[in-house]
Image: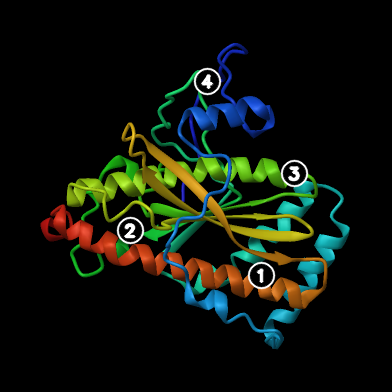
């Protein structure tokens, strides 16, 4: 995966906004129809496994060393940089066994920005999630002859130079204590871009987005020393002006105040969430490829 992103340094006046800009960043997100406050869709495609949380866990012996290491880092990491060295790798260990997916660590995106409809028109820095999860493009067209010359619409591949990771649907930010709100703002931006790209893909295939809106299509997660939160993200079309809004709500939380058992629950929980949202999206994406004539033309 090519992690390089070529850009020029902006001037002080035109410098892009980032999550470090606080209220201005929130205002910029809202100007792009990203709802800052949570709003639960009713009804929504709730995953069944949420009602099957085990009270006790049995940790495989092969994972005990990794879990103990993660706990030790959580307890002793003096700064966020140290925390980043281990935790994302620990979280993504299970992704190695899911070849239909691809993931990147701290890779900056390069895709069309969200259009501002409000007063805050300054550009937003492109997301650089600690973890980005999307589909392996080859797995989406596995029943057809893969053609390197055809890479699909540009918005399908938001990571610069990477034409294998398609249509990301899950991003995760790892932070230390007291910065979870910054992580949530980062994830709101990333989620809106993921939703925008998925929705555009759906619209190009089906001509309408009636079956896309109001369903959870994208997940994000924030992780600190103490807690992990998973958010579901969805779109809805305003009945007054037909504007598209990007919504979110808290789907699940885990505490990390304990030991390796809590870390194992987080690991298994994130794996379950990822498998669920991947399955939710995979079927309609493959169907959309057929409707767009992409798969059949290869």
Labels 4 & 3 near each other (Cβ < 8 A): no
Label located before the other in sequence (1 or 4): 4
The residue under the point 74% across, 80% down is 64
| Relative to 73, 105 lies left or right | left
Q: Residue at x 48, y 46 (%)?
A: 247
Kindly state the secondary structure of the residue where label 2 is placed: helix
Nearest to the eye among marks 2 and 3: give it.
3
* Separation of marks 1 and 3 at Cα, in angstroms: 19 Å
Residue wearing tag 1? 266
* Secondary structure category for the residue under label 4: loop
- Sequence-first disc among 4 and 3: 4
Q: Nearer the viewer, residue 176 or 90?
A: 176
Pick whichever of labels 4 and 2 is earlier in the sequence: 4
Residue occupying image coordinates x 47% and y 71%: 47
Point out residue 91 in the picture as x, y percentages from the top left corner.
Answer: 63, 65
* Whole-number angstrom distance, CA of label 4 to CA of label 2: 36 Å
To which residue does mark 3 refer? 179
Query: In terms of secondary structure, where does tag 3 sit?
Result: loop
* Pointers 1 and 3 in contact (C-beta within 8 Å): no
Q: Are marks 4 and 2 in contact (CB under 8 Å)?
A: no
State whether residue 181 appears in this view. yes
Q: Which residue is mark 4?
A: 120
Give the side of residue 141 with respect to residue 267, left or right.
left
Question: Marks 2 and 1, Cα distance to the nearest angstrom?
Answer: 27 Å
Verify CB contact (< 8 Å) between mark 2 and mark 3.
no
CA gap, disc 1 to disc 4?
Answer: 37 Å
Of residues 162 and 10, the one nearer the viewer is: 10
Q: Depth-wise, is mark 4 or mark 3 nearer the camera?
A: 4
Mark 1 and mark 4 residues within 8 Å of each other at the beta carbon: no
Label 2: which residue? 137
Mark 2 and mark 1 lie on one chain; the one further toward the N terminus is 2
Between marks 2 and 1 in the image, the one whose residue lies nearer the viewer:
1
């Amino acid at each position: 995966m090519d992690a390089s992103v070529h850009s020029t340094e902006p001037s002080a006046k035109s410098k892009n906004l980032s999550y470090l800009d606080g209220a201005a960043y929130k205002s910029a997100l809202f100007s792009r129809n990203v709802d800052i406050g949570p709003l639960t869709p009713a009804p929504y495609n709730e995953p069944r496994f949420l009602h099957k949380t085990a009270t006790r866990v049995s940790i495989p012996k092969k994972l005990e060393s990794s879990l103990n290491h993660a706990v030790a880092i959580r307890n002793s990491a003096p700064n966020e940089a140290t925390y980043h060295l281990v935790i994302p790798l620990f979280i993504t260990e299970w992704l190695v066994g899911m070849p239909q997916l691809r993931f990147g660590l701290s890779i900056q995106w390069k895709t069309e920005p969200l259009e501002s409809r409000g007063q805050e028109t300054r550009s937003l820095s492109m997301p650089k999630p600690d973890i980005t999860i999307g589909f392996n493009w080859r797995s989406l067209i596995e029943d057809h002859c893969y053609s390197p010359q055809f890479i699909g619409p540009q918005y399908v591949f938001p990571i610069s130079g990477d034409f294998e990771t398609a249509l990301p649907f899950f991003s995760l930010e790892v932070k230390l204590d007291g910065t979870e709100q910054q992580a949530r703002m980062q994830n709101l931006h990333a989620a809106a871009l993921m939703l925008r790209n998925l929705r555009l893909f759906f619209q190009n295939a089906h001509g309408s987005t009636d079956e896309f809106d109001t369903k959870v299509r994208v997940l994000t997660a924030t992780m600190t020393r103490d807690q992990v939160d998973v958010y579901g993200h969805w779109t809805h079309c305003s009945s007054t002006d037909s504007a598209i809004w990007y919504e979110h709500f808290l789907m699940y939380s885990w505490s990390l105040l304990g030991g390796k058992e809590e870390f194992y629950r987080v690991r298994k929980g994130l794996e379950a969430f990822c498998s669920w949202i991947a399955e939710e999206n995979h079927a309609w994406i493959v169907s959309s490829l057929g409707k767009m004539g992409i798969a059949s033309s290869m």
